[in-house]
């Protein structure tokens, strides 16, 4: 596991608080070193001044006291130089610590924040363009990982929705094809029915003609029957006359 992946196991808020605490600790340490150097140098100067006053107040040879003061001055100067060098070394060490630890950690933390955000922006742009095939890596447990996980869930949901729409479209296409086939069958049946109706109409016209002819034949038969009845009546009259004539 690299350092960036290790950082992403912590939330961005916690990492920022840790960076602030580290910077504050570094500043406090630098201030403490400066205060220590100043106080140590002040104490050394105060001790030198006190010893100088004692030497000047003590009885004795002036030349001996001057040599003693020179020796104390050299000792105090060496002590002051030692304190100053120690303070400088502490400042340099703290600056190096800041350059070698704080600055790289800050840059690494910035990369750990910006890289997932840029990845999320790329994924969002791809989804907006209709591309749901982009791989989403959401390693870690920070806020950026939560954002990427939300994008992945949205991508999965949209993919499932598109799949359902595609399946529904295929079902609609199949149903439309079946409806079209049924319409063709219905059209063929309608044409057959229309043909049958035409044939029925033709048969009805023929039947009407036959009925009309039958009616004409019936009227003719009726007229013939009436004529036959009249002839029979006349024959009966003739027969009656013949019988009467035979009787006579």
Image (cartoon, rainbow, N blue to C red):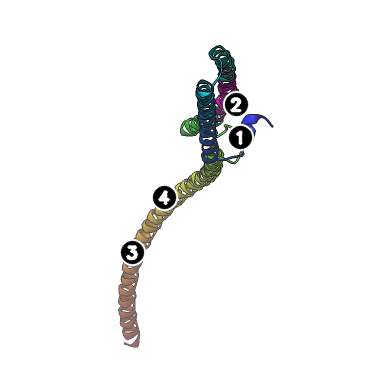
Judged by depth in the image, the label closer to the viewer, 1 or 2, is 2
Crowd rating for badge 4 (residues with CA inside 10 Å; few <14, some 14–19, many 20+)? few
Which residue in the structure is indicated by mark 1? Answer: 7
Judged by depth in the image, the label closer to the viewer, 4 or 3, is 4
Q: Give the magenta-colored segment's residue range.
A: 81-109
Which residue in the structure is indicated by mark 3? Answer: 220
Q: SS class of the residue under badge 2?
A: helix
Q: Earlier in the sequence, mark 1 or mark 2?
A: 1
Reply above or below: 47 against 68: below
- Looking at the rendered structure, which numbered label has been put on residue 61? none
Please say whether residue 123 is visible from this viewpoint.
no
Counting from the top left corner in percent of width and height, residue 225 is at 35, 70
Q: SS class of the residue under badge 1?
A: helix
Question: Which residue occupies the foreground of this view, 166 or 32?
Answer: 32
Judged by depth in the image, the label closer to the viewer, 3 or 2, is 2
Reply above or below: 175 against 109: below
Which residue in the structure is indicated by mark 2? Answer: 101
């Amino acid at each position: 596991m690299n350092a960036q992946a290790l950082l992403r196991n912590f939330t961005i808020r916690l990492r920022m608080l840790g960076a602030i605490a580290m910077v504050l600790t570094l500043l406090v340490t630098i201030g403490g070193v400066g205060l220590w150097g100043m106080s140590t140098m002040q104490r050394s100067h105060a001790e030198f001044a006190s010893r100088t006053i004692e030497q000047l107040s003590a009885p004795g040879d002036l030349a001996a006291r001057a040599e003693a003061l020179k020796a104390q001055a050299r000792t105090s100067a060496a002590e002051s130089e030692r304190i100053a060098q120690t303070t400088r070394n502490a400042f340099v060490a703290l600056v190096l610590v800041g350059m070698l630890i704080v600055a790289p950690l800050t840059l690494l933390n910035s990369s750990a924040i910006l890289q997932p955000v840029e990845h999320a922006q790329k994924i969002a742009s791809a989804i907006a363009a209709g591309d749901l095939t982009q791989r989403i890596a959401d390693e870690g447990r920070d806020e950026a990982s939560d954002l990427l996980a939300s994008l992945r869930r949205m991508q999965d949901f949209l993919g499932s929705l598109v799949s359902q729409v595609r399946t529904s479209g295929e079902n609609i296409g199949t149903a439309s094809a079946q409806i079209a086939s049924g319409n063709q069958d219905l059209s063929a049946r309608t044409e057959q029915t229309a043909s049958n109706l035409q044939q029925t109409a033709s048969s009805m016209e023929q039947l009407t003609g036959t009925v009309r002819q039958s009616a004409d034949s019936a009227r003719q038969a009726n007229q013939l029957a009436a004529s036959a009845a009249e002839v029979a009546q006349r024959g009966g009259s003739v027969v009656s006359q013949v019988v009467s004539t035979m009787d006579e």
